[in-house]
Image: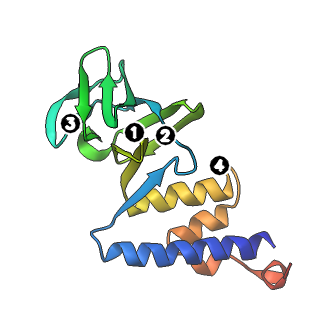
Amino acid sequence: MKCIRSLSIVLGLSATLFAAAQDNTVMRAGLFRDKAMKEVLVMSQRGASEVFVDGVRKGELMTTDGLKINVVNGKVQARSLAFSFASAERIELRPHGGKGLLRITGVQPKVAERTYSGSITLSVVAGDLLLVNEVAIEDYVAGVVQSEAGKDKAPGVLQAASGELSHLCVGEQAQAHP
């Protein structure tokens, strides 16, 4: 049963991978889509991240700082220890060298911290924060597979995600049907 579910996940991700390969291997994914986010805290991990406000580079978010971002009068507002911005249409955070991570915690409503690779763009849509993660397809697929399989589970799924489908299901388990 787990084998078939794992195969379904891998096949779905393979289709996503193929489609994204046609678009420079970058994926854009909405974050916290099931929540009406009003305020978040963003922290840089594994190095500083560049901060762009309405397309203009304004500074760096260091690993020792946090950027509190919220909605005020339909615009994005942000504050950190080093700088603040008011009335922006869009704020983008890009880790240096593409290897850094961004940690995001929902403040209002309260949401547990999650870590993302790639850049994060924040804007306001219908009075709520819209968070979009732009990430390399390889990192996206690895994150989804890990999330679906669990950190310490289903090594066959992780192999399959790397293109080795032949090792996913063998023997009687492969023939089992729920």
Q: Work out whether mark 4 precedes mark 2 in sequence or the reverse, and give the earlier one.
A: 2
Q: Work out whether mark 3 precedes mark 1 in sequence or the reverse, and give the earlier one.
A: 3
Residue 142 percent coordinates (x, y):
51, 58
Q: Work out whether mark 3 precedes mark 4 in sequence or the reverse, and give the earlier one.
A: 3
> Does the CB distance between marks 1 and 4 fall below 8 Å?
no
Snapshot quadrant of residue 124: top left
Disc 1 versus disc 4: nearer the observer: 1
Q: Nearer the viewer, residue 31 or 162?
A: 31
Q: Separation of disc 1 and disc 4 at Cα?
A: 18 Å
Disc 4 versus disc 2: nearer the observer: 2
Label 3, secondary structure: give it: strand
> Does the CB distance between marks 2 and 1 fall below 8 Å?
yes
Q: Which residue is mark 3?
A: 53
Dividing the image into 4 quarters, which one contains the N terminus?
bottom right
Q: Which residue is mark 1?
A: 101
> Does the CB distance between marks 3 and 4 fall below 8 Å?
no
Q: Please tell me whether residue 85 is drawn above or below residue 114 in the rendered image.
A: above
Label 3 crowd (10 A; few <14 / some 14-19 / many >=20): many
Residue 117 percent coordinates (x, y):
40, 46
